[in-house]
Image: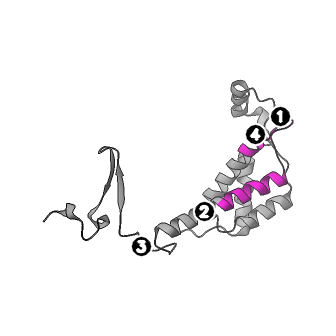
Amino acid sequence: VFFDLPRKAERLEILRRQLHKFFPANAKRSTLYKLARRVFGRPEPPVLCASDADLMDAAEATEGFSGRQIGKLASAAQAAAFACEGSGDAVLDGAMLRATVEQKRDQKRSKAAFLTGIRGGTARGSIPQATVSISAARGGVHHSKAAQPKGDASKGA
């Protein structure tokens, strides 16, 4: 089964739903908030202050993202709001949302570049001939026969 990547309107809806999950409007009444307040001592729940225009910009900037990647973006936005220095309130404004989107776009580009490099120059090419497997049971790295050079004396005669 193949699912195409979400279009702009779908990305906007996914982003809104995910941000609502991480920045709930009625958080003070939720059991999770009450537990977090007891455990972490945070006086107020996180607040979403990003405008609809900020969300539209974020939806446009996340072209090529899957729904899961947009969900991870919302989680990272919540973490950024909690980590923000200042008043002690966890607030996500437009500038912080844009910074989080840009960070996720950079991560996506880095991952694509890495995968392109290990697959021999094509993003969806074949796996390189030299395969390396890490085996914890054997306590180290062993190379398969495909990874050994042709003139290797360890093959045996």
The single residue placed furthest to the top in the displayed view is: 38
Q: Is residue 75 above or below residue 55?
A: above
Q: Percent position (x, y) of residue 66?
A: 62, 62
Q: Is residue 10 above or below residue 74?
A: below
Amino acid marked by disc 4: Phe
Residue 87 highlighted magenta (yes or no) = yes
Amino acid marked by disc 3: Ser
Q: Earlier in the sequence, mark 4 or mark 1?
A: 4
Residue 114 shown left or right of residue 66 in the figure = left
Label 4 Cα crowd, 10 Å radius (few <14 / some 14-19 / many 20+): some
Q: Earlier in the sequence, mark 2 or mark 1?
A: 1
Report if the CB atoms under discs 4 and 2 are less than 8 Å apart: no
Q: Earlier in the sequence, mark 3 or mark 4?
A: 4
Provide the residue designation for mark 4. 82
Look at the image and give the residue range highlighted in magenta. 79-106
Q: Earlier in the sequence, mark 3 or mark 1?
A: 1
**Which residue is at the front of the view, 142 or 26?**
142
Label 2 Cα crowd, 10 Å radius (few <14 / some 14-19 / many 20+): few
**Which residue is at the front of the view, 3 or 130?**
130
Q: Percent position (x, y) of residue 86?
A: 85, 37
In 3D space, how far apart are the residues under numbered discs 3 and 1 (Cα atoms)? 50 Å
Report if the CB atoms under discs 3 and 2 are less than 8 Å apart: no
Q: Percent position (x, y) of residue 1?
A: 49, 68
Report if the CB atoms under discs 3 and 4 are less than 8 Å apart: no
Provide the residue designation for mark 2. 110
Disc 1 secondary structure class: loop
